[in-house]
Amino acid sequence: MINLNKEKASKKITALKEKIRKHEYKYFVLDDPSISDAEFDQLMQELIKLESEFPDLITEDSPTQRVGGAVLDEFKKVKHSTKMLSLDNAFNKEDLIEFDQRVQKNLKGEDYQYVVEHKIDGLSAVMRYNNGTFELGATRGNGEVGEDISNNMKTIRSLPLKIEEKAEMQLRGEIYLAKSEFKRLNKQRLENDESPFANPRNAAAGSVRQLDSKIAAERSLSILIYDLISHSKREFKTHLEVFAYLKKQGFKINWYQAASNIESVIEICQDWHQKREKLDFEIDGLVIKINDLALRKKLGNTARSPRWAIAYKFPAQQKTTKIKDIEISLGRTGALTPTAILDPVELAGSTVSRATLHNEDEIKRKDIKIGDIVLVQKAGDVIPEVVKVITEKRDGSEKEFEMPKNCPVCGGEVIRPEGEAVSRCTNISCPAQRKESILHFVSRNAMNIDGVGPALIEQLLANNLIEDYADLYFLKQSHLKDLERMGEKSSENVIKAIEASKKREFFRVLYALGIRHVGIGAARILAENFNSIDELKSAKIDDLKNISEIGPVIADSIVNFFQERHNIDLLSRLKQAGIRLKNKASQENENFLDQLKFVFTGSLNDFTRSEIKDLVENAGGRAVSSVSSKTDYLVIGDNPGSKYDKAQSLGIEILNESEFKEMIKKKRSS
Ligand code: AMP
Ligand code: ZN
């Protein structure tokens, strides 16, 4: 840190406080941040640091001296019996070790243990239960006075309204919106022409603050409990004991893990950098707490936060950056997708320099221009996206984006069909489209052909070795060997990988075909409803629409796919190559009578002679005319002839018609 003199420090502190207040208002009061949480945290850290260097510059009104934002008027105010503090932050391993050293020093050699929990990115709430019933729920507000949101909290399904314990007790927990629920809500809002929420936290905050609890109920809020503040009848020794008790009382408890020292705490923290993506709710870090409640008391609090806990914050997932340019990339269906080229930023531990903008309408809706400063975010494994434009940062030099009239790869005409959001290159032999469709075909969820990547596909196309994905199956090692960066060994591996993909399940093949709008989920459903590609091909549009998960758009697209001659040709070459174009069950069971020899005698009720012979032969069995020692079964109808006696004398198994049907059924499903 640069050494500032007091005068300069004072100026800097005043400016920082102003800035933080402005952002606090936007973030906590309006739920409409113009900077990311990480950038806000950074400002705060800066102020804390400065104030600790010049403690006599700390003023009563400094953001570091209070816990949250202002209280809104609309709800009844609730004074908290115990002040709801904030948590100190740790951003790395060193901060955690420092925290541990402080604890160690303050406990003067006493033994202690930690409990690590998720730091759920929602809103903290306090709940009061009395005589076994939920009595009050309140927000944190400014830490001393919150808002009565009991009605909205009652809509949270996982929160018990009645519990066994007939005592007065107060709990704390975090209200949040599940990621899946957030997605659903935003989709719905877009459909209703309402602006979508920036993230699940803002959505949860907006829902908790609904004056109409019916709206809150529609939002499906969740809560996880992480603390017991008071209890009129019981005393507990440890946090783990409290959790066990609360669990028993029917509360949904926050995830936790005990850790005997700071090293294992650090390990747990690092472990969750990746693992958190798998959760259906956002966590922005982990909270590390002292397990022993007596030791917590001993450690006490500062004005702002407890000394017995710290929040470990993950690297940021949202940041502001500049859109340097908007580039067009081409998809396998010829769709032109605009992509923002960003000034690179660190986001969730990786450098982000591109963000998807989806389509023209999305750019219009978000009012994105080239040169804009935007808030970008990365959630899970998804491609980073632009949350919103920081319009205050515009200086007039920003440029409007326009969709090109011609394909940037082949120069073909670009059209945007009526009622569609997507613009497409209309040239069917556009090389970009071919490459993308092959890339899709070999991708992990599709045929999973390792070793066939973008570079190889480009070479294969350029050398006229393939024109489409079906051609892959007719490649020989001799074709590959002489390509760039393709030795004996790697060409052998490529051929092996292509060969191995012939065993991929039918639904993956369906997905791999690249039928527009048929994602892996739809492909699975189609494979459940149609046993083979031929069944699917002969399906009528209404057969498809009648499947509940298949909408009219997918149905149309499937029918159109099978109407194109090129696609029929593709399929026949795939069939020739031995790709699985039917479900495994029906394919394996096709031979369920594997070489068994059948003889028939007498008149059957449910089959003609040729029908039953077809049935047996189509299932891989053989229908023979006379009984011998090699016959496996004799099937008898009414008035059997001499074959019956012969079979009996040879000890051959004899079935009547219903026994035969029973056996077929059993073998088919085995
Ligand atoms: P901060 O707002 O960054 O100062 O962090 C304090 C806030 O973290 C609390 O007010 C809670 O809203 C939230 N929080 C989330 N998960 C937990 C948890 N497991 N334990 C304590 N606080 C939590
Ligand atoms: Zn093109």
Image (cartoon, rainbow, N blue to C red):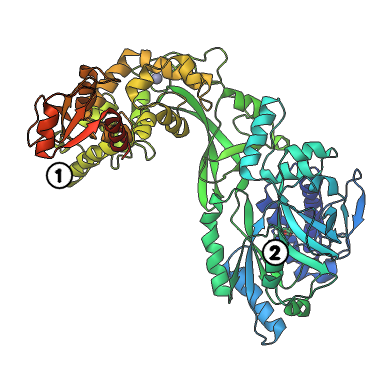
Q: In this figure, which residue is indicated by the disc labeled 1?
A: 488
Residue 346 disc label: none
Horizontal arrangement in the rendering, residue 160 relative to residue 608 (left or right): right
Give how far across and how far down residue 200 sits, in percent.
67, 44
Up the image or down, 74 lies above or below 18; here it is above
Up the image or down, 294 lies above or below 270; here it is below
Q: Quadrant of the C terminus?
A: top left
Horizontal arrangement in the rendering, residue 320 relative to residue 574 (left or right): right
Q: In this figure, which residue is indicated by the disc labeled 2?
A: 248
Residue type indicated by callout 2:
Lys
Residue 431 visible (yes or no): no
SS for tag 1?
helix
Residue at figure coordinates x 17%, y 34% from the top left: 633
Along the polypeptide, which appears first: circle 1 or circle 2? 2
Give how far across and how far down residue 397 sits, in percent.
65, 30
SS for tag 2?
helix
Give how far across and how far down residue 203 sits, in percent.
72, 41
Quadrant in the rendering for residue 364: top right
Residue 221 visible (yes or no): yes
